Amino acid sequence: MKPIPVAILGATGSVGQRFLALLDNHPMFKVVALAASDRSEGKPYGQACRWILADPMPAWASEMTLLPAEPQALQAARIVFSALPAEQAKTLEPEFARAGFAVCSNASSYRRESDVPLLLPEVNADHIQLVRAQRLARGWQGCILTNPNCTSTGLTVALKALDQAFGLKRAFVVSLQALSGAGYPGVSSLDILDNVIPNIGGEEEKVEWEPRKMLGQLENDAIRLAEVRFSAHTNRVAVVDGHTVCVSVELGQEATPEQACRALSSYQAPAAARNLPSTPDPVIVVRDETDRPQPRLDRLTGGGMTTVVGRVRPDPLLHLKFVVLSHNTIRGAAGGSIYNAELLVRENLL
């Protein structure tokens, strides 16, 4: 198929850079436009962007001129990938949707809207059908679809596998979140070195609510939230990439650690979300070492799209406890939005 032209909003930031790197030589999409803030508009991308990824900046991107984040300036694209801050996204993303663009957003602005899909294709691919109701209700030719908070991502993938096999009632979670989740330049070194910051604004509320929407059921053009109760503690730690979450769960029926490991490692994405360029293969890797997963060793499993689970064991208060690791700027951000866009194309919703 002929590559679909796409643009990136917020292209010079850390997530914007990850979008650009993951879209380099993508089999379905071709980047035709990059947009950034007013201070960078009109400059070559290579001049305006302080590149922070380990892989080199693609040569084709370096010479691209940064355009304003306005629909009329990005008419060459059909899909826009949004790495905008939430406040900017709240205003700009609907403008693009009204103008006919499919907006695949990493921002939190529209995740709670009843007609906006909050997508992890390997969990809730059918929720993408909300796009039809969204277009009808809002009179848009385009649409907005979102991926979840980067801490909710790996957590929800693991919980989906357990919920499908045993049912799920309650989850108590403690996050150890990487610095890249705070963007660039992120957290001051004087704040994070020799330290753990036990509060990340708004994160606990997201982690306690977002999985309920993703684990919920699509009924009559709306999502019925899953009846799972969550309690979350969120912490920033001195790790560059990779969010670690320690989880204790009460299941619908008791399961041994061995049964849980089998359910996790055998979990497959819904048929509609399989065999896309970004589909994690496998969806979940279960480590049996006593000290894994670890961000430095495991965050790039499956190219950063696979969820890694370890230390599955009995919990003395609930049923089971375990550790989840997910790459926050790949699976939890740019890679997740790209996967959502691939599903949108497959479902003929573009």
Image: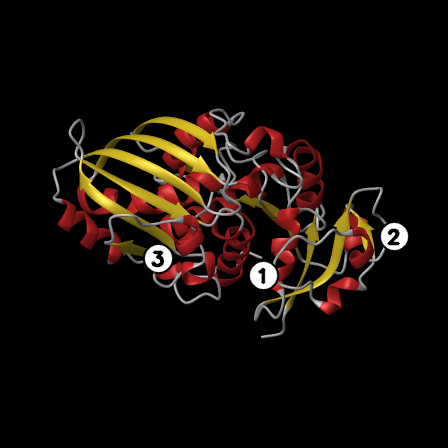
Q: Label 2, label 1: how many angstroms apart (C-alpha)?
A: 24 Å
Above or below 55: residue 309? above
Residue 334 seen in this snapshot: yes
Residue 27 image position (x, y, % from top left)? 57, 71
Circle on res. 283: 3
**Residue designated by label 2:** 42
Q: Is mark 1 on a helix, strand or loop?
A: helix
The amino acid marked with disc number 1 is: Leu
Q: What element carries label 2?
A: loop
Res 256 quadrant in image: top left
The amino acid marked with disc number 2 is: Gly
Instruction: Check if mark 2's residue and mark 1's residue have beta carbons within 8 Å.
Output: no
Q: Is mark 3 on a helix, strand or loop?
A: loop
The amino acid marked with disc number 3 is: Val
| Left/right of residue 179 with respect to residue 151 in the rendered view | right
**Residue designated by label 1:** 22
* Among numbered discs 3 and 1, the one appearing first in the sequence: 1
* Among numbered discs 2 and 1, the one appearing first in the sequence: 1
Please identify the residue farthest to the bottom as the structure is shown: 1
